[in-house]
Image (cartoon, grey):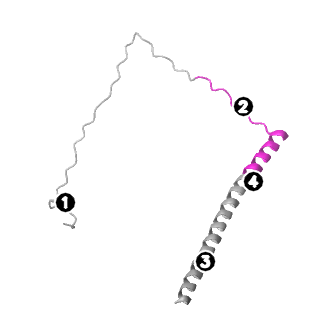
Amino acid sequence: MFRPKIPTMPTPTGIVTSPVVEPTAIVQHTPDSVPAPVLVAPAVPARPTVQLTPGTALALVGGGTAVVLVVGAVLVSMLLAVAVTAASVAVCALVVRSLIASEHKRR
């Protein structure tokens, strides 16, 4: 019931047959009376260059600083939450241990 069912393969004969591929010729027929359309690529407009002025550089530095401060505040708050949780679990463990020890002393 729990044994895997492996499909059985017939024994190999050693004869290898390759599929037959016949070449086909592709002939495109265009009438002589209709001229072929001339494809002209549309002109690509030049991309504007980014100019870094002192104002934009100051804005970039300020934005980067704000991002670093926000990410740092989030990480510090998460670390603080973990530390508070660990401290509360430790206090609970001490209280439970004290209750169990006082229960054994009364007997």
Where does the image place residue 95, in percent across and percent down from the top left?
60, 77
Residue 48's disc number: 2
Q: Look at label 4 and name its amino acid.
A: Leu
Query: Which residue corresponds to the image point at 80% horizontal and 42% vertical from the top-left?
Result: 59
Q: Nearer the viewer, mark 2 or mark 4?
A: 4
Where does the image place residue 34, in percent across and percent down from the top left?
42, 11
Q: Nearer the viewer, mark 1 or mark 2?
A: 1
SS assignment at label 2? loop
- Asked if marks 2 and 4 touch (Cβ < 8 Å), the reply is no
The magenta segment:
42-69
Q: Earlier in the sequence, mark 1 or mark 2?
A: 1
In this picture, residue 54 sits left or right of residue 32: right
SS assignment at label 1? loop
Where does the image place residue 52, in percent across and percent down from the top left?
79, 39
Q: Which residue is mark 3?
A: 95
In the depicted view, which residue is nearer to us: 79 or 62?
A: 79
Q: Look at label 2 and name its amino acid.
A: Pro
Q: Nearer the viewer, mark 3 or mark 2?
A: 3
Residue 44's disc number: none
Q: Nearer the viewer, mark 3 or mark 4?
A: 3
Question: Mark 2: few, some, or many residues within 10 Å (few <14, many ≥20)?
Answer: few
Q: Earlier in the sequence, mark 3 or mark 4?
A: 4
Query: Which residue corresponds to the image point at 53% horizontal and 88% vertical from the top-left?
Result: 104
> How far, Cα to Cα, is label 3 from label 2?
69 Å
> How far, Cα to Cα, is label 1 from label 4?
62 Å
Where does the image place residue 63, in percent across and percent down from the top left?
76, 46
Q: Earlier in the sequence, mark 1 or mark 4?
A: 1
Q: Look at label 3 and name its amino acid.
A: Val
Q: Which residue is mark 4?
A: 69
- Asked if marks 1 and 3 touch (Cβ < 8 Å), the reply is no
